[in-house]
Amino acid sequence: MVSVNKETMKLVRRVIDEADRLDAAVSRLPSGATVIDMGVNRNGGWEAGRLFSEMTMGTLGAASLDQFMLGDVYLPSIDVHIDQPLIATFGCQIAGWQVSSGAFSVIGSGPARTQGKLKSDSYVHYVDYRDDNDEVVLCLQMDALPTDDVAVSVAKACGTTPDKVYLPVASNTSITTSVQVSARSVEQTIHRLQEEGFPIDSILWAWGTAPIAPVADDKLKTMGRINDAILYGAVSDFWVRTTDEACERVIGRIVSEAVGARPKPFADIFIEHNRDFYQIPHNIHSPARVHLHNLATGRSFAAGHVDYDLLKESFLK
């Protein structure tokens, strides 16, 4: 079986070699761990965001930039194509590893999750896969560079040494983060399928697309926009082999219009829940539109729609 950390390290070394071109920076912590700044003190960019996205998926997903029409405005978008969706998302991309140091706390994603397999990281346990590699990669979305405590805790959980830990990081208001969040169209759908009782082991391949939200120095506005990009703009397609009844049962329940998100911008939902992500109902985190293609019968199922009006309100005002 492929080692997702070993494969991702190939991409990490490319980013390190091309750091100047990507407007990234590489530094070492006292423990020897490597921090790759892709959007904290450096600007990062489109390519940094695309590569960050592929790292979060353990390189089991290919990400490519495209465009999205919002009325008469052209916006960038990102497509992801995934051949092993369960490992790429449940095992790697879902932000499920809570890293804490004193008052500091951040949620990590990436292939190190498959090696650490923390009990508190519930989604990683939906796949049997477990990695075993000397070098590990945990991607962090945070507004400051991680401390040595973070690297030491990751190393301990993964059964390696801190000098073998690599931490790509980008801030919440960076374009790198806006790109990598929009690259979660498949991830945002697959966890909803699992939560609604769909047989996830029937999923073979997946594809998704979403617009990339414009960022701003205003943290609340940017946070709202990057979530709106998924809630109201993400479309995902899944190829499955199961019963038509299984598809029919879930298809209308896993899109954002079915779970009470619409027609509010995410920033408003966040404020209504005391600015606390953990108070927001988990099923709010759903995509705009989903297609299920059943290989067993040849039938396809679809639900939801892209909310262009809400995206205009969020992105252009």
Image: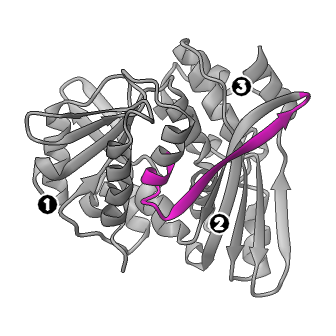
User: In this view of the protein, can residue 53 be seen by the observer?
Assistant: yes
The label shown at residue 118 is none
Instruction: Kindly identify which residue carries mark 1.
Output: 159
The C terminus: image quadrant: top right
The disc, 1 or 3, on the residue closer to the chain's N-terminal end is 1
Q: Is 211 on the left or on the right of 18, as rendered?
A: right
Residue 202 lies, in percent from the top left, at 61, 79
Instruction: Name the amino acid, label 2.
Output: Ala
Instruction: Kindly identify which residue carries mark 2.
Output: 206
User: In this view of the protein, can residue 281 be seen by the observer?
Assistant: no
Q: Secondary structure at mark 2?
A: strand
Instruction: Name the amino acid, label 1.
Output: Gly
In the displayed structure, would residue 134 be above or below residue 271?
A: below
Instruction: Kindly identify which residue carries mark 3.
Output: 265
The disc, 2 or 3, on the residue closer to the chain's N-terminal end is 2
Instruction: Name the amino acid, label 3.
Output: Pro
Residue 266 lies, in percent from the top left, at 66, 27
Kindly report the distance in space between the C-alpha atoms of the residues bearing marks 1 and 3: 42 Å
Kindly report the distance in space between the C-alpha atoms of the residues bearing marks 2 and 3: 27 Å
Residue 19 lies, in percent from the top left, at 37, 37
Magenta residues, start to end? 53-72
Are discs 1 and 3 less than 8 Å apart at CB?
no
Q: Foreground residue, 15 or 49?
A: 15
**Image quadrant assignment for residue 107:** top left
Q: Secondary structure at mark 3?
A: loop
Are discs 2 and 3 less than 8 Å apart at CB?
no
Q: Is 288 on the left or on the right of 42, as rendered?
A: right
- 10 Å neighbourhood of mark 3: few (<14), some, or many (≥20)? some
